[in-house]
Image (cartoon, rainbow, N blue to C red):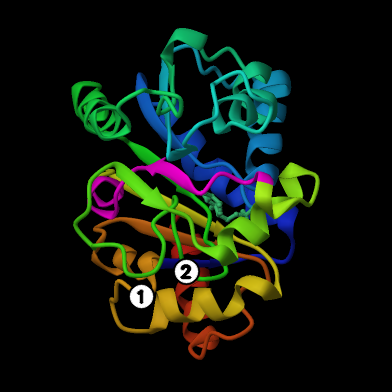
Amino acid sequence: MQIILCDSEEQVGRRAADLIEARVRQGPAVLGLATGGSPAATYAELIRRHREEGLGFGAVTAFTLDEYAGLPAHHPQSYHSTIRREFTDHVDLPPRRLHTPHGDAEDLAAEAVRYDASIEQAGGIDVQLLGLGANGHIGFNEPTSSLRSRTRVKTLSGATRAANSRFFEGDGEEVPKLCLTQGLGTICESRQAVLVALGEAKASAVQAMVEGPVSAFCPGSVLQLHPRAAVVLDPAAAGRLTLLEYYREAQALQDDLQ
Ligand code: GLP
C-alpha cells in the first residue's frame, strides 16, 4: 500500500487526479468510479484539467462501484444520476460508455452477475477510485463482506443508511435498504486502486484498513492484498495512523524518484 499524506482536501484531489490522469493519457482506459463526498475534489480537479489542460476522456470507459436497489437510473439520488452530475457530464466521456448497475432490474441477482461480467468484457478496470465508509466499507461492501465476493445484492447497514440520509433530505427511511455493489474480489482485480479519505470521521477506519489485520470486518483492509493500491489522505483522516513518520519519509523518497 502506498500512503500519500496531503495537507488539504484540494491536495487529495490533485494527487488522486494525478494517478488517474497518468493512466488516461496512456490511451484507452477503463476507470472505476466512486460516488459520495470523498472523491468530489478529485472529480473537480479532473474536470478542471479537462477544461484547462486538454485532458480527454473520449477513450475512457467507466463503471461505477455500486447502485441503490429500487432506484431507476433517472432518480436524482441514483448513483447513475450522481456520477453524471458530479463528473461525467462535465467531461467528454461518451455517455454510452458509462456503466452503472441497473438498480431497478427485475432480477437483481442476475443483474449483478451481468454487471460483473461486463467489467471483465471491457478488459477489467485499470484504475479504481474508492472512498471509505466510517465503518470501513468500500463500495457498499459492509463489514463481514466476503473478501472474495463478486458483484451482488447487499443489505445496507443502519450506519450507512444514516450517513447517506443527507442525500435524501435527512430522511433515513428514504434511503433504500438494498443495493448492488462490486464485490471485494471484483475490486481487487482492478490493476490499480486509489482510495481517498477525508476528515476525522474516517480516521479509525483508515487506521484499521492500513494498519489492522486483513479482515472482513473492515472491508477496506482487503486492499492490503491488492498489488497496487494508493491511499490518499488529508491530515484528519491520517490522524490515527501510528507509522506516520515512516509514511512521510517513504513519500518524500518516492516523490524524489519522480
Ligand atoms: C457510500 C458509497 C461508497 C463511499 C462511501 C463513503 O455509501 N457507497 O462508495 O465511498 O459510502 O462515502 P463518503 O465519501 O460520502 O463519505
Q: Amino acid under label 1?
A: Phe
Cα distance in 3D space between marks 1 and 2: 8 Å
Checking the image for residue 187, the label placed there is none
232 left or right of 143? right
Q: Amino acid under label 2?
A: Gly
- In the picture, the quarter occupied by the N terminus is bottom left
Classify mark 2: helix, strand or loop: loop
Extreme residue in the bottom direction: 242
Checking the image for residue 136, the label placed there is 2
245 left or right of 236? left
The vertical placement of 250 against 7, above or below, is below
Residue 204 appears in which quarter of the rendering? bottom right
Magenta span contains residue 187: yes
Disc 1 target residue: 217
How crowded is the residue under tag 2: few (<14 C-alpha within 10 Å), some, or many (20+)?
many
Classify mark 1: helix, strand or loop: loop
The vertical placement of 89 against 256, above or below, is above
Residue extent of the magenta highlight: 174-188
103 left or right of 167? left
User: Residue at the location (55% across, 29% down)?
Assistant: 71
Residue 14 percent across, percent down from the top left: 64, 47
The vertical placement of 144 against 77, above or below, is below
User: Residue at the location (54% across, 62% down)?
Assistant: 133
Q: Between residues 167 and 60, which one lies in front from this camera angle?
A: 167
Residue 99 percent across, percent down from the top left: 42, 22
Q: Between residues 22 and 62, which one lies in front from this camera angle?
A: 62
Q: Between residues 105 and 148, which one lies in front from this camera angle?
A: 105
The vertical placement of 209 against 233, above or below, is below
Circles 1 and 2 in contact, beta carbons < 8 Å? yes
User: Residue at the location (74% across, 62% down)?
Assistant: 8
Task: Work out whether mark 1 precedes mark 2 in sequence or the reverse, and give the earlier one.
Answer: 2
Residue 137 percent across, percent down from the top left: 45, 62
